[in-house]
Image (spheres, grey):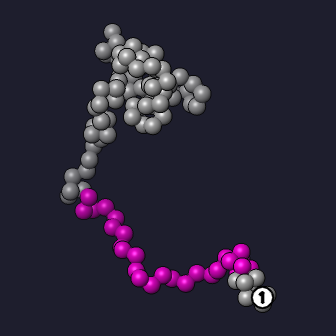
Amino acid sequence: MASDKFYMTIEEAEAITGMSEATVRRRVGDGSFASFQPGGPGTKILILRDSLFGHDASQDLIVPSPAAKSHQHQTPPPSAEQPSRPRAKWARFLDGAQSGVPQ
């Protein structure tokens, strides 16, 4: 039964939505319809059924609680003073070319 399937082909999506094949492919390409290719690039595209009807699949992701977030590694904000790094050879070359003095 089609309603039991989580994924459907482009042809099935056309029949359900009434959109043309080009429109369905365009929606897949711009990310409007969640899809994947189980065989890799150049193979059949399968579209997530719920994405056809405006259901945001990202809402189904498990979100950690605020307590769990407090235990995650916190990166300090960048300081105003950046550590000095050696200049790249191409940058040193450009500096010498602009001043006329080889380095």
> Which x, y percent locates residue 25?
48, 27
Given residues 39 and 24, the one toward you in this image is: 24
Residue drawn at 58 percent across, 81 percent down: 85
Residue drawn at 68 percent across, 77 percent down: 91
> Which x, y percent locates residue 70?
24, 62
**The C terminus lies in quadrant:** bottom right
**The N terminus lies in quadrant:** top left
Q: Which residue is mark 1?
A: 100
Q: Which residues are magenta?
A: 69-94
Residue drawn at 36 percent across, 74 percent down: 77
Identify residue type, mark 1: Gly
* Magenta stretch, overall SS: loop
Query: Is 84 colored magenta in this rendering?
Result: yes
Is disc 1 placed on a helix, strand or loop? loop
> Which x, y percent locates residue 47?
42, 26
Given residues 58 and 17, the one toward you in this image is: 17
